[in-house]
Amino acid sequence: MGSEAVVRLTGVSKRFGRVEAVAGIDLAVSQGERVAILGPNGAGKSTAISILLGLTRPDSGAAALYGVPASETVRAGRVGAMLQGVQLPWYATVGELIALARSVYPRSLPASELLRTAGLDRLTRRRIEKLSGGEAQRVKFAFALAGDPDLLVLDEPTAGLDVSARVSFWDTVGRLAAAGRTVIFATHYLAEAEDFADRVVVIARGRVVADGTSSEIRRAAATERRVSFRLDGASAAGLDRLPGVRTVAVRAGRAVLTCDDADAAVSALVQARGQVTDLEVTVGGLTEAYLALAHPAEAADEEREP
Ligand SMILES: Nc1ncnc2c1ncn2[C@@H]1O[C@H](COP(=O)(O)OP(=O)(O)OP(=O)(O)O)[C@@H](O)[C@H]1O
């Protein structure tokens, strides 16, 4: 496909009171890509998705889908979404809800195809209140598919599903993606991202801390460290050229270096500057995000940045 991005977030930020939920995210996704958004609880994934869909207005920045403001594309029925926290009306039957979902789109999938794809063909007369959690997820999935969308946006779509339901869910999404659809999904499961996505975007504290294939990110997370020290009025110029250093930022009078090789960076730093004050070496944002995904309880104990 051409280079025009299907999804483009440009410098989007969103604050809720004191919480900076999204702190300047840029993201461009091309047609047909399968993108996983990974990140620990509270990282800003759902807020970024809500902005991407035009449901939440960012404080700054913009969201475009297919080159126009997100809300226009959503209104035109080109986007199907599965969001967290959506309640289905308990008194309706599956069949009634599917009819409703189809009725809102100018071009909807035939009911039989929709029911089959979502695995609901034997449940059409069942009331929502009688469905299992996994079956209710399938109804939400059917809602996302009803308009035969070009872009599927799924926020933790397999939360609460057992292993076999997950496998069959991703099989179905895989078939839909193979037909050329773009799929963006948020997840806490590293394995899902690795198995299904061709690109993984890791978000931590409202920022994109890594963007690449899952193996690139796994490698980077294993070695990334943050080296910081007090500048005491000295310039940060040239620090980005030190060996092992990937990025340089200055915060509150400190230089903060993100390093692929902290040992090499620190040796070179001491050699170049002679003396370095109040030196700190900590795990970087990506490693921290990864730890939080792989070992949620341990990461929760880690100190959080203000
Ligand atoms: N409407 C809101 N009002 C106040 N705070 C909010 C609101 N929505 C999100 N937040 C806060 O913004 C931060 C990011 O939340 P968000 O739901 O985007 O994270 P997430 O990465 O999707 O988390 P999870 O994996 O737990 O679903 C959190 O601290 C959350 O409490």
Image (tube, rainbow, N blue to C red):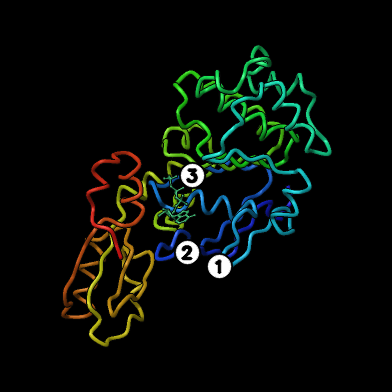
Query: Could you tell me how far apart the alpha carbons at marks 1 and 3 are, in whole angstroms?
Result: 30 Å
Q: Is residue 96 above or below residue 227?
A: above
Q: Position of residue 250 (x, y in %)?
A: 34, 76
Query: Could you tell me how far apart the alpha carbons at marks 2 and 3 are, in whole angstroms?
Result: 29 Å
Q: Position of residue 44 (x, y in %)?
A: 46, 53
The quarter of the displayed image where residue 58 is located = bottom right
CA neighbours of label 2 inside 10 A, class few (<14), some (14 to 19), many (20+): some
Residue 172 shows which numbered tag?
Answer: none
* Extreme-front residue of the structure: 91
Q: Is residue 175 above or below residue 297?
A: above
CA neighbours of label 3 inside 10 A, class few (<14), some (14 to 19), many (20+): some
Question: For the point 26% across and 55% down, which residue is it?
Answer: 283
Q: Which residue in the protein does label 1 denote?
A: 59
The quarter of the displayed image where residue 98 is located = top right
Q: Which residue in the protein does label 2 denote?
A: 15
Question: Does residue 18 appear left or right of residue 270 in this picture?
Answer: right
Label 2 or label 1, whichever comes before in sequence order:
2
Query: Could you tell me how far apart the alpha carbons at marks 2 and 1 are, in whole angstroms?
Result: 7 Å
* Extreme-right residue of the structure: 106
Question: For the point 46% across and 36% down, which residue is it?
Answer: 194
Q: Position of residue 293 (x, y in %)?
A: 35, 41
Q: Quadrant of the C terminus?
A: bottom left
Residue type at mark 3 is: Thr
Q: Is residue 180 above or below residue 286?
A: above
Question: For the point 29% across and 62% down, which residue is it?
Answer: 305
Question: Does residue 277 appear left or right of residue 261 in this picture?
Answer: left
Residue 213 shows which numbered tag?
Answer: 3
CA neighbours of label 1 inside 10 A, class few (<14), some (14 to 19), many (20+): some
Residue type at mark 1 is: Asp
| CB under 8 Å between discs 2 and 3 | no
Label 2 or label 3, whichever comes before in sequence order:
2
- Label 1: state its secondary structure: loop
